[in-house]
Amino acid sequence: MSAICLYFQVHQPFRIKKYRVFDIGHDHQYFDSPEGSRLNNREVLQKVARKSYFPTNRIFLELLHRYPRLKLAYSLSGVVLEQLEAYSPETLASFQELVATGRVEILAETYYHSLSYIFSPAEFERQVKLHTQLIRRLFKKIPKVFRNTELIYNNQLASTVEKLGFTGILAEGADHVLGWRSPNFLYHPVGTQKVKLLLKNYRLSDDIAFRFSTPTWNEFPLTAPKFARWASAINGSGDILNLFMDYETFGEHQWEDTGIFEFLRYLPGELLKHPDNYFVTPSEAVKKLPAVAELDFPHFVSWADVERDISAWLGNAMQDDAAAKIYQMEEAILKTKNRGLISDWRKLQTSDHFYYMCTKWFADGDVHKYFNPYDSPYEAFIAYMNVLKDLKMRLETLQKVKNHK
C-alpha cells in the first residue's frame, strides 16, 4: 500500500517599499507602499487570497466532505497569518474551517519565514516558538512536524528540531543526496534518535506546480486520471508519495483558465480509485511508517532551482552582505526590548528579501524574475540596504536615550 501526503506552503512577505536614500532618518515605515504598487502588501495579499487561497480552500472543504479518507497539511508563515488577519479575515476563517474538520494538519516553521537557522540558531528557536504560539492561538493546535523555510535542511537542523520536540521534518528529495535511494520512503536523519524525515517527490510535485500549463511539455495536458496512474505506480516500490508545493500553485501560478481547479476537484477521487492508495498527514506518516535507513545531508539543501541548494538566497555578494548585516544587529536590537524595532528587524529577515536580490538568470532564472516585484535585483538590494541604515539609526537613537537615563 502507498500513502499520499499532500502538503502546501502558504506564505506572503511584508515587501519593502522602494525606500530611497532620502528617506533615511525621516521615514520609518518600510512596508507601506502606495496603492497600485506591486509592493503594496494589502493589495497583493488580497489578490492572492481572491485568486488562490479562498477558492482553493472552498474546493478542499468540499472534497473533505465528499471523501472522508482525504487528508492534507499546511504550513502558514507567521507573516502571512498577520496579513490574513488584517487584510482578509474571511480567508483566515476558511483555513480555520479546514483545520476544524480534524483531517487537516498545521506544521511548524519559523514565524518570519527566515534564514535564521543558517545565521542564528538562537533566533531560529525564538521564531519557531513564536510561530507555535500563533498556531495555538489561531487554530487551537500544537504542531508536531516541522518544515523549515523553503525546505532548507541539513543534518544539524534535524538534531535541533528533535530537541525542540518535533517528531518529523520535511525536506527535498534531492537526487544528489539520495543517489540510488527513493524519496518514497521515510528516513532517519543522521544524529537523531526519534525524528523522521519526509522527502518531497519533486518530479510528481513539480508536474503540478510548474509544468501543468506548459504546452511544450510532452505530457501536456495533465489530467487527474493520468496523474493518478503515475502516483499509483509507486505501489510496490515505495511507502509514501509526498506531494509538496506552494499553495499559490492553484489559481495564482497556474491560473484558473488553465483548468487547475478542475484538476484539483477530480484528483482525490482518481487517486482513491486505486485500492492501495490512502491519504495521511505528516504526523500520521511518522507514526505509521517505518524509517527504512539513515540519510546523510551534510550540506544545506532546499527545494529551489535545479541545484536544490541555498544559492537562490545566498548566491551573490549583495545577498551575502545584506544577510550578514541584518543578523549582526541581533544582540543590540533584542537588548532594546523595543517591540516596533524588533518586529521590523524580524520582518527584514524574511527570505523573500534576499530572493529578490537573486541574479541567477540562467536555467530557472525566469522564475526569479517572475516572482520579483522590483524592477531588478539591484533595486531590491538598494531599498533593503537603505532600510538597514535607517534601522541602525533608530537603534543608535534608542541606545543614546538609554545611556542618558
Image: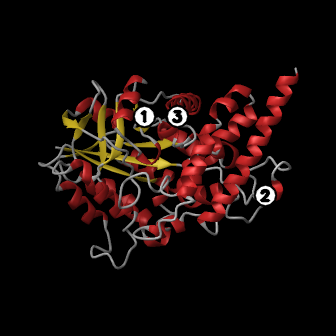
Residue placed at 39% from the left, 46% from the top? 7
Please report whichever mark, 1 or 3, sits nearer to the chain's N-terminal start.
1
Question: On the rendered structure, is 239 left or right of 32?
Answer: left
| Location of residue 232 by image quarter | bottom left
* Furthest residue toward left: 236
Q: Which residue is mark 1?
A: 102
Q: Which residue is mark 3?
A: 120
Residue placed at 33% from the left, 57% from the top? 205
Q: Which residue is mark 2?
A: 21
Q: Are the residues tagged 2 and 3 within 8 Å (C-beta)?
A: no
Please report whichever mark, 2 or 1, sits nearer to the chain's N-terminal start.
2
Q: CA distance from mark 1 to mark 3?
A: 35 Å
The image position of residue 111, as x and y in percent, is 56, 37
Q: Indicate how the structure is coloured in the image.
A: secondary structure
Please name whichever residue, 253 or 177, is drawn nearer the observer in this view of the structure: 177
Q: Amino acid at mark 2?
A: Val
Residue placed at 48% from the left, 37% from the top? 117
